[in-house]
Amino acid sequence: MEARTVKEIVAFCQGLFDDLDFTRAREWKAAVPGRKVIGYMPVYVPREIIHAAGMLPLGILGGGADLEVIHGDAYYQSYICRIPRSTVELAVTGRLDFVDGMIFPSICDVIRNLSGIWQILFKDKYVRYFDAPQNFREDVGGVFYSNELREFREGLEKLAGRRITDSEINASIEVYNENRLWVNRVYDFRADFPWKAPSAEVYLLMRAGMVLPPEEHTLLMREYLAAAGAQDRPMRDNCRVVLTGVFCEQPPLNLIKSLEISGCYIVDDDFLLISRWLLEDVPADGDPIENLSRAFLLNSAQTAAKYEADMEVKGRYLIDAIRKRSADGVIFAAPSFCDPALLDQPMMISRLDALKIPYITMQYAENSGQMQPIREQSGTFADSIKLWSSS
Amino acid sequence: MSGREVVKSNSQLVQKEMISRNYDKITDGNHKVSSTFVPGNLNELLMCFDIANNLPEINAIQNAMRKKSGDMITEAERAGHSEDVCTYVKADIGMMAKGNIAPNGKPFPVPDILLLSYTGCFTFMKWFELLREQYQCPTVMLHVPYAADGTPTKNMREYIVRQLKEDVIPALEKVSGIRFDIDRLREYLRKSAAAEDDMVWMLESTKHKPSPIDCYFGGVYYMGPIFTAFRGTDEAIEYYRLLRLEIQERIDKGLCAQTPEGDMPEEKYRLVVEGPPNWTSFRDFWHMFHESGAVVVASSYTKVGGIYDYEGFRHDPDHPLETMADYCLGVYTNRSLPTRVDMLARNIREYEADGLLINSIKSCNSFSAGQLVMMREIERITGKPAAFIETDLVDPRYFSAANVKNRLESYFQMIDQKRRLGGSAAAGM
């Protein structure tokens, strides 16, 4: 088969992104009788265990900019972020009827309570609130987390009607190690050649990984990297920024495009953190539960949803990203009413202030429509960086 | 309303003294001081180390009731804190910016330790991360897992006990210089359980018709000692004994609920309320209820520190660390939505309430997210009407008296209508 062009690959990803009926996942399920699909919300769940059960992990990230929320507003007050209401909208309009179970990670009280709404509204579905430890000692939080993983595994075994063996999980760990390797290569490539891998494209490519089986997503990333590397594109005089705060409710695609159009290359971000959550390969032999547990405790990304026991370490993950990617500044983009992002922001800002790293802050909702103010703000930011940092 | 003379019972005067003494203890410079949160707090454990217990939510409430929180919140927002986040946090940070003055007029000390009990509220975690930046003091975290499937599991309980043993107790020993004595803890827990029996009697006294007390506006006072720095003390035992006698006397006399303006003349509506009260207009808010003859017979807010009237929990001195774990796991906002629904629906039935009122708090996702679904579910289960009002905890900008009053009046009309159709007997019948 002839290799696809960047344009064709991106068009394919855009098709997946736009499809709020999740046709691709439905087709995957229908292809073999008995297959099951498990939805998960941000920020992290161990997809390896779902995959090992022969199920498709499906990332649910709200309804995006184009979903008209008709029913969802009856479930949530105006002062609660938009992702739960559009997620409920997806469900009550039947768009998630093929999803056999939903996992709600411990990211904030809104997603936590959404697990309860699911329990009330969809009594026939498997629902799990996935709690992760905030104590990162192996003999304390580690014991708790390993037991939670075992419970999670047992719940999926019940749903699957069969055992999930250690070797199956180890095989899935290898699949996800490989997937993460290519995710990181795409991120590295973008950081090195941001004009060749615009962030809107990279975002769509990563979003595809929320819908496709991981093996297929890995092939897609390899294909993209080959095509993007071979294609000449004009380099703009943009500044380099890290975009942070976007780990749960997603901004509209137009916002990502607007940032780059206005003069900011995004060279790192915290979109879809699940794809890069574990910072090193998980050993694919031995006890997979203990290995996944240790990976979470000792080698996982830092985000606002995690407690940082050492004040000196707070913010280091962001600062490391700025340094590693040679970024000129940071854009804090937080969803309105997002407790983790907004409460964390003043602490992150104090770290940047101390290092004199420029930043701007902005808020959005997944259906924000007006991009002109965003473009003006980020354009001014880019100009000020170029003006003051080149002197 | 604020100008009216306030009627206070003996127990209220006693409690006022207790709170005042605790603020003196916190600010006298002679005690080690911990800051920690109300839900599932470890007061008995802190007492084992002679550490005074300072509770930032209570400080925010005190400031709100004194009409000071608005300026404090504005101050925090000026310093870069978002308009969208918890107003308790901003009131606390704004209070620090304005000199960190306690209600007794003395400055709060830098805490010797921040005991970050992450129980039922995500914001707690960020709140103390923010305070840690300001105070630069030792911080110890107690992570309480969410009881998502209704019942806490053995794994959750053991995780909490391990954290207590491995992290929390060693940190408190280090700060205080006092070695942990489990028998001392047992003794405090024994006292907790003694006070808790009378406290639960108080909660259940509202089953009487008319109800002798209001279990939301009044309830926040009655729950004060058990949820704050007095659980495990002789003072708390004495307070609840006194309160019980007072309530019994009210029942014997057939009195309606006590309010700041005296006894309600008539009990027309019996309500169950979900959600915290608004604190900036607390008395005006309460007035809207009692002037209409509405009394709250049960509320979720009286379960916010810990739940005693659902599964019969009492602190168990024979299993000291485990019982503290169970207490933390059991707090209202740490329970799943279906459990909260069951609790409130049960309250409506058992207390023969006319319906459910939800006071949804703008800046409290832990309570508010999901309340519209809870409301519909409880209406479905009980067949009783429910209503929804929106205010905030300590931000005066989000209390619209006219709006709240209109909604309450409409709700009372709805109850009347339902009664006429035979759905709910009149209160006091």
Image: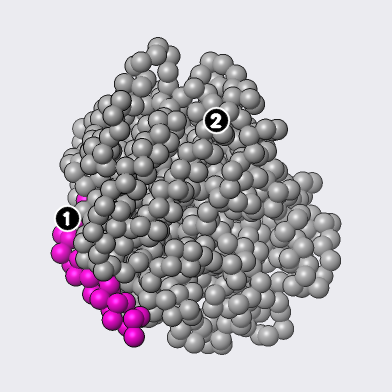
Q: Which of A60 and B3 is in front in this view?
A: A60
Q: Which of marks 2 and 1 is nearer the N terminus?
A: 2
Along the horizontal axis of the image, is B197 left or right of A41?
right
Q: Are marks 2 and 1 on the same chain?
A: yes
In the rendered image, which quarter contains the N terminus of chain A? Answer: top left
Along the horizontal axis of the image, is B249 left or right of A185?
right
Eye-nearest disc, 2 or 1? 2
Residue at numbered disc 2 = A172
- The kind of residue on which mark 1 rests is Gly
> What is the spatial separation of the Cα atoms under label 2 and label 1, in whole angstroms?
40 Å
Graded by Cα atoms within 10 Å as few (under 14), some (14 to 19) or many (20 or more), the crowding at tag 1 reads few
Q: Are marks 2 and 1 in contact (CB under 8 Å)?
A: no
Q: Which of A46 and A87 is in front in this view?
A: A46
Q: Which chain carries label 2?
A: A
Q: Image height check: is B293 above or below A218?
A: below
Q: Give the range drawn in magenta.
A: A367-391
Q: Where is residue B86 in the image (x, y as percent from the top left)?
A: 40, 64
Graded by Cα atoms within 10 Å as few (under 14), some (14 to 19) or many (20 or more), the crowding at tag 2 reads many
Along the horizontal axis of the image, is B277 left or right of A149?
left
Q: Where is residue B324 in the image (x, y as percent from the top left)?
A: 68, 51
Q: Which colour scheme is used?
A: one colour
Residue A66 included in the magenta stretch of the image:
no
Secondary structure category for the residue under label 1:
loop
**Residue at (75%, 61%) from the top-left corner?**
B169
Residue at numbered disc 1 = A369
In the rendered image, which quarter contains the C terminus of chain A? Answer: bottom left
Q: Where is residue A28 in the image (x, y as percent from the top left)?
A: 36, 22
- Magenta highlight: main SS: helix
